[in-house]
Amino acid sequence: MKTPLTALALVLTATAAFAEYPEKPVEIVVGYSAGGGTDVMARTVAQFLEQELSDGASVVVRNMPGAGGQIGFTEVSEAAPDGYTLGTFNLPAALALTKDRAADYDVDSFTYLANFVEDPNTITVAATSRFQTLAELLDAAEADPGAITLGLSSLGGNDHFAANMMQDASGAEFTLVPFKGASNARTAIMGGHVAAGTMTLGQTSNFPDELRVLAVLANERSPFRPDVPTAKELGYDVQMSSLRGIVAPAGLDEATTDQLRAALSAVNENPDFQAMMAEQGNPIAFMVGDDFAETASNQDDIAARIWAETPWK
Amino acid sequence: MYSDLLHALPDVFAWTNFAAVVIGVIAGIVVGAMPGLSATMAISVLVPFTFGLEPLVALGLMAGIYNGAMYGGAIPAVLLRIPGTPAAVATTFDGYPMAQKGEGGFALQVAVVSSSIGGIASAFALMLLAPPLSKVTLLFGPSEVFWVAVFGLASIIFLLGGNPIKGLISACFGVFVSVIGSDPIYGNDRFTFGQLEMLDGINIVILLVGLYALPPVIDLLETPLKTDGVNSSKLGTEPIWKALPRMNYWKTWLRGSFLGIWIGILPGAGGSMAAFMSYNEARRTSKHPETWGEGEPEGVAAAEVANNADTASALIPALTLGIPGTAVAAVMLGGLLVHGLQPGPMLFRDNPDIVFGFMWQFLFGAILLVLLGGSLATNSFARLLNLPRPLLGSVIIVLMLIGVYSIHGRMFDVYLMLGFGAIGWVMDRLKFPLPPVVLGLILGGFAEENLRLALRIGRGDPLVLFQNTTSLILVALTVAVVVGPTLKKRFIDSRKKA
């Protein structure tokens, strides 16, 4: 009974491999609802990927929101690695949640195709705040440990890790206040309900007169805000960011992997794509293949370390 | 800023943009009128499709749907005692008794005129007062929002219905449901039984549909031979301009608009709380409060004006701060992001034509409501009551299943909804009030999340909850709501003795 089935499966795989990929619609699973930042990126990529794959190729976005993206990430990791199911991948969130709860996937469950967006974290205060520089803020937090409240979006994400790493690097101690989402944290900063906060640079960009960005947690200054120093320049070697890319299930055959990576690289090089991403306020940090995989494994280590040292639940 | 407002007007009248609003309003009324389908759902389904549309076409559709659905929810609330949307719960209080008395047509006309007035007031608030009102939102930090939620819960329990104990039990059930899912601070699972589907908590629409739509459907099917044909032929479908002079609810409209706008700009509370508060206030100040709940048209006016008055105002914190005042506004924010429109003060500077155009579309959506809503409701939906009961019941059940399934596209939610339906049926039979359950779910989560955030900010010191004027005002209001009725009763009693 088993042998004919295996044979059939082999024949089918062989046929699939020989046929021109893609011969049916390619699906990008998004673990969040339509209209979010990740969803908009997926739809923009999908639109350009169609042109790059072949004439008449169809790339559709499917939203599977829930459990902080986990339902969608799980769906991708468990899909057949045939190139017809891709997914958006958010770092460090997607891997951080494998630490603090039971997840059916880990860092090795995916074929890393390409990362598109990297939005660095910042340390931000209200424009009316008495803190003019990062040093002033950290001094206050060191002088009276816990007296400085730091607003952020939920624990176990890039904001939380950024705050944690900043504390480790400086010896300051903040009281972390995890709001539901970055916009709530931002509003609390602007309303003076928390003393400071961390969010990505992109999340501060529409509030230039209301917020003061003290430092950006990246290796280099951002082209969007060249006036803001990096934490590294100020003496604290801390990097944290939110990344968004495209992955496939692990075990995707080499030919299809290469084809998809090449197509996604071509998408990235398209000036129209770059223009659309800029309009949406998405800072592009394109990484393809092994670079992306390495970043993912790096982020996985950071999440594991923070979870081991200071578990957040 | 006001010149930007005028500058945006011509684009709004481009025929595609205007047609979008008209289609949106009609679609919104239809969606709102169907039990199980809500504005939130309709707009989330729409968002992916708007990717290829012109921004003002997409936003016009959304503005129309939002306005239409907030009124559409009143149609089944009046005719069947099934609120079509969460915000229409308070409309059932007097709308359904009116329909039973044969005044269903008038109830729907009161609803459409009130909805439209609320929508227009709200649109003006959005157009003229968005920046100052967003400053008000900034005053509300975690401890203030906590008190808003407590105040809302207290008013619902103590002001609605005769039996505060049963109200309290219902509210506790609602608050319990709000606890299900991952906790708001640490993300620990609570009552999820390991189901990923329950990690995000219980969606309000699932609870509402189960609790409110299933019991009336069971009633419909229990007596299959009787039809409501008698009632619907007496709907009273006189033309709306003849009905207008009978509507003299200016105070209620004014108060309801104010409350709706006010609650809309506060994070999270939304249309249902606005409608309840407006209903409570209107009843409290009425000269004949005993007729309320028995088919008082002013009750319909109070509920409907407020649940439309929070539509545009909920967009004030959404557009200026990125924090939506209601679930619908949250989805609409997604629709804006699709078009690269990021919330914040820069939005008004970078894309004034689109943002102010969107505001105009809200205004026109609200005005169109009277023209489209009146005839659509009385001429088509009201005829539903002529359907044989088994057919009507089956149609509603199918809509419920489709609506709930389409929220996340999973059967799990449908089973949950049926479970809530069973609970709702038992509660209905035992005369437990259902509105506190809905408010308990909406406000309970807010109360918990913000209480815990406030305590974290205060590093565990509960005094942080009483540290500023806004909080203290809200505490005083809450106390007044809880002890006020008792004191008033004693006062009246003692005067009677004397």
Image (spheres, rainbow, N blue to C red):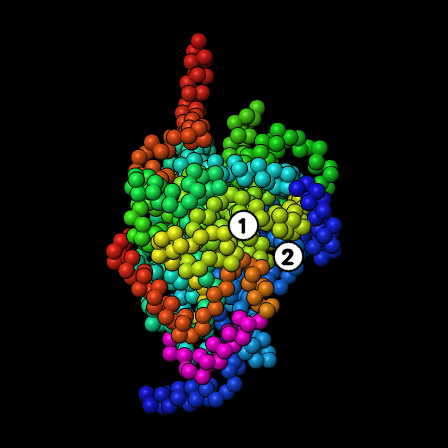
| Disc 1: CA contacts within 10 A as few (<14), some (14-19) or many (>=20) | many
Residue B131 left/right relative to A186:
right
Q: Residue B399, relative to residue A1: is it above or below?
A: above
Q: Are marks 2 and 1 on the same chain?
A: no
Q: Check disc 1 and give the amino acid type.
A: Asn
Residue A252 belongs to the span the image colors magenta:
yes
Q: CA distance from mark 2 to mark 1?
A: 19 Å
Label 2 or label 1, whichever lies nearer to me, is 1
Q: Quadrant of residue B237?
A: top right
The residues colored magenta run A248-270
Q: Residue A289, relative to residue B213: is it above or below?
A: below
Is residue B57 something that shows in the picture? yes
Q: Check disc 2 and give the amino acid type.
A: Pro
Between B405 and A145, the one lying in front of the other is A145
User: Is label 2 in a helix, a strand or a loop?
Assistant: helix
> Which chain's residue wears label 2?
B
Q: Position of residue B380 (x, y in %)?
A: 66, 51
Q: Position of residue A1 (x, y in %)?
A: 32, 88
Residue A144 belongs to the span the image colors magenta:
no
Q: Are marks 2 and 1 in contact (CB under 8 Å)?
A: no
Tell me the number on the disc at residue B55: 2
Q: Position of residue B422 (x, y in %)?
A: 40, 51
Between A248 and B119, the one lying in front of the other is A248
Q: Quadrant of the C terminus of chain B?
A: top left
Q: Quadrant of the N terminus of chain B?
A: top right
Q: Residue A30, relative to residue B431: is it above or below?
A: below
Residue matched to label 1? A206
Between B438 and A61, the one lying in front of the other is A61
Tell me the number on the disc at residue B228: none
Q: Quadrant of residue B341?
A: bottom right
